[in-house]
Amino acid sequence: MSGRDSATASARVVLLGASNASKGISLLIDGAEQLLGTPLDIHAAIGHGRSYGQRSVLIGRSIDGTLPCRLWEQVEASAPLPTYALLTDIGNDIMYDYDVDDILAWVDQCLGRLRAMNAKTIITGLPLPVIHRIGNGQYLFFRTLFFPKNRRTLKETVDRVYRVHEGVRELAAKHEATFVEQKAEWYGLDPIHITQRTRGRVWGEILSHWRDEPEREQIICRGSVSRFLRVRTKLPEHWHLFGVLDLGRAQPAT
């Protein structure tokens, strides 16, 4: 998804993520506008269950991975602008059972391409403070429903989460990106998704890192039902249903 003519925009925003980014997209746009002004040239590769490196399939719907999607060529072909980026929701590929080294290589490539654009990039770690809340029964239900090909135990998955988290921290340092640790109070009974009650404050806290100290200020992102509906109806270029019907649309989906 992308929007606005870069010729009139004051800055460019690149949003990469999965379900949390999708649920919070209206808030993220508002936060970006509060911090960076308007109009903005916004490009997003988000979507529930989205993989960073491969096409993902979730309950019959499939979309391209973040790295192979056309967002990159669209951004790189656009007029230069001050660029701000957010990478979040990195844990899906763990549940798709991709190798940890492959997951980190995909994140590394995303960060490298953003660094080549001189982007000011924020990347979130994985939700380590709440991972211990996941019980074996809850894990098996979630794994069976959404990731039926994954046969790893809860312990194996938790070990992989810690490895990816530390690897992402190292990649952030390598690419001079801001690494943001997640907090337990951002989550409720669901250890994967930021609670609706805290989303505005959480995304504001995260996005505030686009500004350097001492200019950094805490903002609260404001939601808009009309903006949420308008943005969430913008499908990616390829959006397949049960591997047959392509409901995607030409980009940019403004």
Image (cartoon, helix red, strand yellow):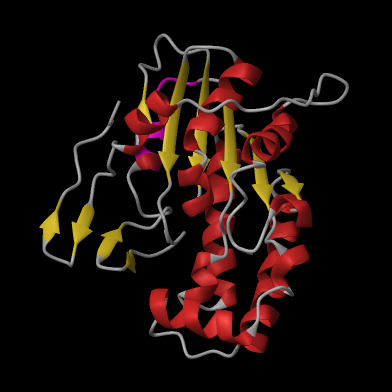
Span of residues in magenta: 72-80
Q: Residue furthest left?
A: 244
Q: Which residue is painted at 71% across and 73% down in the image?
A: 133
Taking depth in this image into account, of 190 and 14 the one nearest to the observer is 190
Residue 99 vs 224, above or below: the answer is: below
Q: Which residue is painted at 50% across and 69% down in the image?
A: 93
Q: Whole-percent x and y of residue 252?
A: 28, 30
Q: Whole-percent x and y of residue 15?
A: 51, 39
Q: Which residue is painted at 77% across and 52% down in the image?
A: 185
Residue 155 vs 181, above or below: the answer is: below
Q: Residue furthest right?
A: 214
Taking depth in this image into account, of 96 and 70 the one nearest to the observer is 96
Quarter of image, res 91: bottom right
Q: Whole-percent x and y of residue 151?
A: 48, 90
Q: Which residue is painted at 59% across and 57% down in the image?
A: 108
Q: In this view of the protein, can residue 183 be seen by the observer?
A: no
Q: How many marks?
A: 0
Q: Is residue 77 magenta?
A: yes
